[in-house]
Amino acid sequence: MAAVDSATVGRMADSLFIERGLRSPGSTRFWVLLVLAAVIASAGVVGDSTATVIGAMIVAPLMTPILGSALALVLADRAQLLRCVLLALGGALAVVSVGILLGWVAAPPDAFVSNSQISSRISPRLIDLLAALATGTVGAFALVRTDISDTVPGVAIAISLVPPLAVTGLLITVGRYHDAGEAALLFTTNVAAIVATGTVVFLVYGIPAAARRSGYQVSRFHGRTLAAVIVLVLLIAVPLTTGTYTVARDRALAADARPIAEKWAKAGKWQIISVKARNGVVVIGVLGLPPPPSPTALRAALDTHGIRDVDLELHLVGGRTQWCPADTDTCTIRYSTLG
């Protein structure tokens, strides 16, 4: 492993520690790019466009203060640590605010139920933490090693920071607060992974010693700091474990419900376009010409086949959404859907 020299430490500090003052070049670049990335991400999510969301991930500068927090931890620089944390928090709130604003303007009548960009970011699992740890390691490694800096755009795409925050804001607008919290958990997972892996990589490369050689004021790094970071990651792993179980349960539930729904729709010459389960709720999309099949008949069919203890949400494309609670034989209209 090549030794880190003073020039590398200086380059890292210049890259990650944004200058004070809102009018400084670093601050203006950070906030302008962040707001633009938030608009792009929110628009991409509303339009269900993967390419647009990826563009926002490349533009977004949130990785800078988050990795800066890791560097400040290693250098035991409390002032820079506080600044980086405040920048990351302020940036996160700014992105959520942009998502809320765009949600007020462009939220669809179905509250994003059929949006794949949102669906992929409201069920964080342990595998997401594993991917975030690997991606954060690559990001820190690329920062230390200038010979692999070409991987940075790939890291920006792999680590999801701005899109989950945009999803959080959009879901707050339509009142899906639980799912908004899940999207925020995905963001928190990625942040914790970046800080943890960044701290470890910087310690392995001997950044504190190199900083002292370069004349940088470095306080003593305590082992309890690293322990606190590891504990944070472990704490985040707890809800992710629950999320992993929930996703597995929902997939099994959707698989059980699909043949029942297809048989029900076939009787009325309608077509099933999607069968999903979300947090124990069966969500079915159905398409066809009027008159629509009876939602209570589907509720009864599910009950007959042992799927009695779950709620049913039935989306009639071009019509309305029916809500059929568990252990009842009635359905009510919740909201209209897009045609």
Image (cartoon, rainbow, N blue to C red):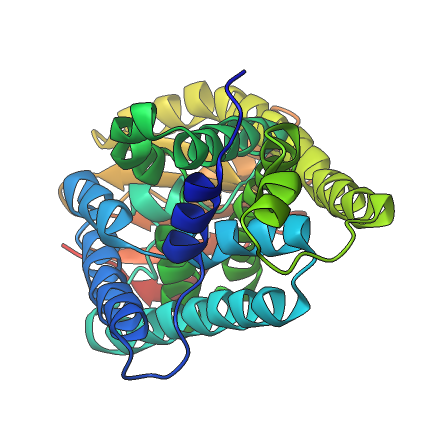
- Tell me how many marks there are: 0
The one of 331 and 203 positioned closer to us in this rendering: 203
Image: 101 above or below 52? below
Question: Residue at the spot x=36%, y=48% of the render?
Answer: 118
Image: 125 above or below 62? above
Expressed as whole percent of the image width and height from the top left, the position of residue 98 reads 31, 73
The C terminus: image quadrant: bottom left
Expressed as whole percent of the image width and height from the top left, the position of residue 242 reads 71, 37
Image: 252 above or below 79? above
The one of 286 and 42 positioned closer to us in this rendering: 42
The N terminus: image quadrant: top right
Question: Residue at the spot x=54%, y=21% of the render?
Answer: 256
User: Where on the picture, by quarter, is residue 283?
Assistant: top left
Expressed as whole percent of the image width and height from the top left, the position of residue 171 reads 41, 64
Question: Residue at the spot x=77%, y=39% of the render?
Answer: 234
Question: Residue at the spot x=35%, y=61% of the render?
Answer: 166
Q: Which residue lies furthest to the right in this view?
A: 224
